[in-house]
Image (cartoon, rainbow, N blue to C red):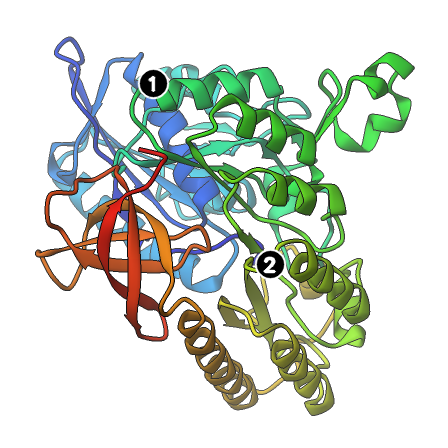
C-alpha cells in the first residue's frame, strides 16, 4: 500500500528503440507501483545485451515477461488472467517462453512452476542480473527459478533503459527493500531487507539523464526517508559501522542536497515517505532548494491510534499531526497526499471517524484510498481475522473518498490567480490544442499550446480549476529554461 499505483499504466507493454543486431523479441508487461515499472527498465537493459529487442505485439514475442505486484488482490487476479492469455498464444507458438518477475514471483514460485505449470521461469526482484543464465536454462528446456533475496543488490551499476517515457521525467531508484514490518504489507517479504544505493552512482544516473534532456526525476524507494549510505550494507547494521563510516555517511536529506546542487535546473521529486522516518532535515532541505518540488506523499493508512498500532505503523496520530505542522510551518505551500486503508481488521465506527477527522485536519491535496484486502503471507493475514463486512468497507471507503474530493477541490482553488511554473509533459488528454504538465505541488495543469513544446518550463497564470486540474494561460518561459 505504500507505493502509488497508477491505474492508467497497469499492464502497459514496454517498447524502446530496436538494435539491428538483436534477433529475439521481448514482450514485457508491468503491474503495480513505480518501483516495478523502474525494474522493468532494468530488465530491458539487461536483456538488450542478450540479443532481445522489445515488441508491443504479443504474437511476435520469443519471451514474454510479466512484472508483478502482490500489494492488492486485484493486481494478482489481473496477472493470472494475463498468464492464461499468454498460455493460449503459447499453444500456437510452442517456442515462446513465459516468465514471471517481481513480487508475486517470489511469493507464488512453486504454485506457478510446479502446481499450475503456467510459466517457464520465475525471477524475484533481486535476481534480474541472473536473467542471462535463467534464459539459457529455459532455452534448453528446463524450468528456471531464482527468487533469492539479496542483502546488497541495488542495480546501481545497471543503467536502466527508459521505456514508454515522455522524455521529460524519469524514475531513479535509491533504495531497495523495506525494514518496516507493517502488518498489512508484503513488501518486506517480497523485496527483502532495506539497502541503499551508492550516492555517486545516483548522481551519475541523474547527470546522464540531464545530458539526455530529462528535466525532472523522482527519487524512488519503498521508504526514501530511510536512505542511508555508509559504504554499503543493510541499514539495520549501521550501528556496527566504523566511526569513519558513520562520519562520512549520507542520509536522505544529504542525498537530496547533493542531487539538488548537482542539477539546479532539474526538478526533483521523491516517493514514498514514511511518517515514522521523515526528519526535519528533509523538510529543511526541501525549503532550501527551489528545484526540490514542494510535494510530499505521506501515507498515514489510518487516523486511529488503535488501528495504527495494529498495523505496526510506528507513529501515532499526534506524531503525524506534529509532522504535518512542521511541514506547513517550514514549507507553507507544500502539497501533501495520502494512502488510506479502510476496513482493517477490528476497525470500529469510532476508528473510522478518527480517520475522517484526521483528513479534516490535514486537508490532503489528493490521495490513494483502498478497502482492506487480506494479502497472503502478511502478519495481518496470519494473526488477524478479516472481520469487517464488505458492505461496511465499501460504505466507509465512499465516505473517505467523498471527504478527499472536497479537500482536493479546496486545495486546487488555492492556486487560482497565481502564476506557477509548469513543466510541459505532453498533450492534454481532453484537447489536442492544450499542453499538460504539473506544478511543483504535483497538481496537473493545462494551457493552450501556442509556441511552447514538451520539456519547456512555462509560467502559467491559473484562471480556473476542477477538483483535480488547473486551467490557465502561458505568460512566458520560466527562468529554468
Q: Image check: 374 left or right of 195?
A: left
Q: Are marks 2 and 1 in contact (CB under 8 Å)?
A: no
Q: Image check: 243 left or right of 315?
A: right
Q: Which of these two is toward me, 52 or 412? A: 412
The image shows a total of numbered marks equal to: 2
The image shows residue 477 at horizontal and vertical percentages of: 26, 41
**Residue 68 in the image: above or below residue 212:** below
* Circle 1 residue: 211
- Sequence order check, earlier mark of 2 and 1: 1
Give the label, 2 or 1, closer to the camera: 1
- As helix, strand or loop, the secondary structure at mark 2 comes to loop
Q: Which of these two is toward me, 57 or 216? A: 216
Give the quarter of the figure containing the N terminus.
bottom right
Answer yes or no: is residue 149 visible. no
Q: Image check: 450 left or right of 246?
A: left
* Circle 2 residue: 376
Q: Quadrant of residue 154?
A: top right
Q: Which of these two is toward me, 306 or 242? A: 242
- As helix, strand or loop, the secondary structure at mark 1 comes to helix
Callout 1 environment at 10 Å: few (<14), some (14 to 19), or many (20+)? few
**Looking at the image, which residue is at 56% across and 89% down?**
392
Callout 2 environment at 10 Å: few (<14), some (14 to 19), or many (20+)? some
Q: Which mark is residue 31?
A: none
Answer yes or no: is residue 35 visible. yes
Amino acid at each position: 500500500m505504500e507505493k502509488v499505483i497508477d491505474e492508467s499504466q497497469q499492464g502497459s507493454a514496454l517498447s524502446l528503440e530496436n538494435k539491428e543486431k538483436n534477433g529475439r523479441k521481448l514482450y514485457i508487461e508491468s503491474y503495480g507501483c513505480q518501483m516495478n515499472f523502474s525494474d522493468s527498465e532494468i530488465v530491458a537493459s539487461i536483456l538488450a545485451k542478450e540479443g532481445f529487442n522489445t515488441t508491443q505485439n504479443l504474437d511476435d514475442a520469443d519471451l514474454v515477461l510479466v512484472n508483478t505486484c502482490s500489494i492488492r488482490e486485484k493486481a494478482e487476479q489481473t496477472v493470472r488472467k494475463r498468464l492464461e492469455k499468454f498460455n493460449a498464444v503459447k499453444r500456437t507458438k510452442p517456442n515462446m517462453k513465459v516468465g514471471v518477475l517481481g513480487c508475486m514471483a517470489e511469493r507464488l514460485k512453486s504454485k506457478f512452476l510446479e502446481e499450475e505449470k503456467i510459466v517457464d521461469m520465475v525471477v524475484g526482484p533481486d535476481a534480474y542480473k541472473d536473467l542471462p543464465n535463467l534464459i539459457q536454462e529455459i532455452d534448453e528446456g528446463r524450468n528456471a527459478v531464482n527468487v533469492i533475496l539479496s542483502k546488497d543488490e541495488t542495480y546501481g551499476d545497471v543503467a536502466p533503459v527508459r521505456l514508454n517515457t515522455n522524455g521529460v521525467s524519469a524514475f531513479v531508484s535509491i533504495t531497495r527493500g523495506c525494514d518496516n514490518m507493517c502488518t498489512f504489507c508484503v513488501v518486506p517479504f517480497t523485496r527483502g531487507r532495506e539497502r541503499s544505493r551508492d550516492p555517486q552512482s545516483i548522481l551519475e544516473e541523474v547527470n546522464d539523464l540531464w545530458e539526455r534532456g530529462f528535466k525532472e526525476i523522482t527519487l524512488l524507494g519503498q521508504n526514501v526517508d530511510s536512505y542511508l549510505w555508509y559504504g554499503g550494507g543493510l541499514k539495520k547494521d549501521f550501528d556496527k559501522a566504523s566511526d569513519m563510516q558513520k562520519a562520512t555517511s549520507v542520509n536522505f536529506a544529504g542525498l537530496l542536497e547533493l542531487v539538488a546542487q548537482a542539477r539546479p535546473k532539474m526538478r526533483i521529486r521523491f516517493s514514498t515517505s514514511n511518517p515514522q522516518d521523515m526528519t526535519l532535515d528533509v523538510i529543511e532541505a526541501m525549503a532550501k532548494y527551489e528545484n526540490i518540488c514542494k510535494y510530499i506523499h505521506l501515507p498515514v493508512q489510518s487516523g486511529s491510534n488503535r488501528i495504527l498500532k495494529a498495523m505496526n505503523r510506528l507513529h501515532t496520530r499526534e506524531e503525524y499531526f506534529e509532522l504535518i505542522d512542521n511541514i506547513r510551518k517550514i514549507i507553507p505551500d507544500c502539497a501533501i497526499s495520502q494512502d488510506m486503508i479502510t476496513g482493517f481488521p477490528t476497525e470500529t465506527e469510532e476508528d473510522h471517524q478518527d480517520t475522517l477527522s484526521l483528513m479534516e485536519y490535514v486537508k490532503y491535496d489528493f490521495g490513494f484510498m483502498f478497502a482492506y484486502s487480506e494479502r497472503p503471507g502478511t502478519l495481518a493475514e496470519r494473526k488477524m481475522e478479516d472481520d469487517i463486512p464488505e458492505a461496511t468497507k465499501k460504505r466507509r471507503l465512499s465516505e473517505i473518498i467523498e471527504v478527499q474530493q472536497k479537500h482536493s477541490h479546496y486545495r486546487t482553488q488555492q492556486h487560482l490567480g497565481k502564476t506557477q511554473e509548469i513543466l510541459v509533459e505532453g498533450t492534454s488528454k481532453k484537447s489536442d490544442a492544450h499542453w499538460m504538465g504539473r506544478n511543483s505541488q504535483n497538481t496537473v495543469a493545462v494551457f493552450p499550446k501556442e509556441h511552447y513544446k514538451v520539456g519547456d518550463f512555462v509560467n502559467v497564470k491559473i484562471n480556473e480549476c476542477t477538483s483535480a486540474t488547473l486551467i490557465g494561460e502561458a505568460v512566458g518561459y520560466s527562468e529554468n529554461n
